[in-house]
Image (spheres, grey):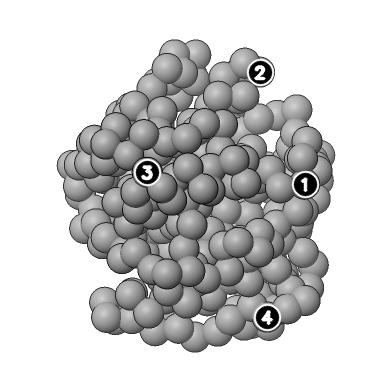
Amino acid sequence: MNEYGSLTRVAVRGPKAAYRDAAAIASEWEALRFHGPPELSAAVTEHAFFVQCLKDAGAEVIQLPEGEALTLDSLYTRDSLIVTPKGLIACHMGRATRRGEPLCNAAALERYGLPLIGEIAPPGTIEGGDLIRLDDYTFAVGVGPRTNDAGVDQLQSILGAAVEIHRVPLPPPSHPQDVFHLMSMISPLDRDLALVYAPLIPASFSAWLSRHGIEQISVDDDEYLNMGCNVLATGPRRALMLSGLPKTKALLEQHGVSVTTYNGEDISRKGEGGPTCLTLPLARASSSFL
């Protein structure tokens, strides 16, 4: 699997399962460093539109259930599991409050023929938002506040020596509990195209991408701060992104990318989780280039 083939199956968790009710939101949002308390009914409306966009792109959408050990952050399904051709790897989350998510999500997905084939164990940590894959044998993993070298070592052991993992050093966030994943600064759009925020891309990572034939186009500074670099490829040069980012939208369209937008004030901006965070891609069709 890669990050840009036509999306055919994806897992999400809706706001009713993640946010639960007004009391849960009120008790959690500040500790989890949301920018404000999400409004549940607005979040439900936004997420329903977002899910319809995924279906319109051709994806089967699996709704993950609620669970006792989950928090508001469980809306962001990308982080808890790593999908491989043989099955799922449960992450050991860098954020301690999220450690109930991996096994809860894995149990739900087992019913869809996706077995759990491995787990990252302490002292290793890894979160799915720190991982991008060019194909089944080529991965980049960000090493920083949520993913450590011990976690990447375990991932390498599970995947095997035939898989290349390029480690990308990540800058520290402004607050130790804030999120900064690899996918905060790169979103693959096609086999040969990725949206990046160039000021944060290490030279070694940029060179690695270039060696793999990937052109890098960079978001504007002000739109990066509004999650302009968080864009989900629903197929080769087809993208789903937050509304209100006109410069990024124009940049993508200049490079032949068809763009769909959604309003995500209560599902994305308040919790700093864009479309890649909201989705766990489970299957993608091979692109026409492969």
Residue situated in front as seen by the camera: 250 or 226 = 226
Percent across and percent down for residue 74 are 46, 56
Residue that numbered label 4 is attached to? 121
Location of residue 42 by image quarter: top left
Residue situated in front as seen by the camera: 145 or 83 = 145
Sequence-wise first label, 4 or 3: 3
Cβ–Cβ below 8 Å for labels 4 and 2? no
Q: Amino acid at mark 2?
A: Asp
Residue that numbered label 1 is attached to? 176
- Which structural element holds mark 2? helix
Q: Amino acid at mark 3?
A: Ala
Question: Which mark is on residue 22?
Answer: 3
Sequence-wise first label, 1 or 4: 4
Is residue 252 visible in this depiction of the protein? yes
Location of residue 99 by image quarter: bottom right
Residue that numbered label 2 is attached to? 221
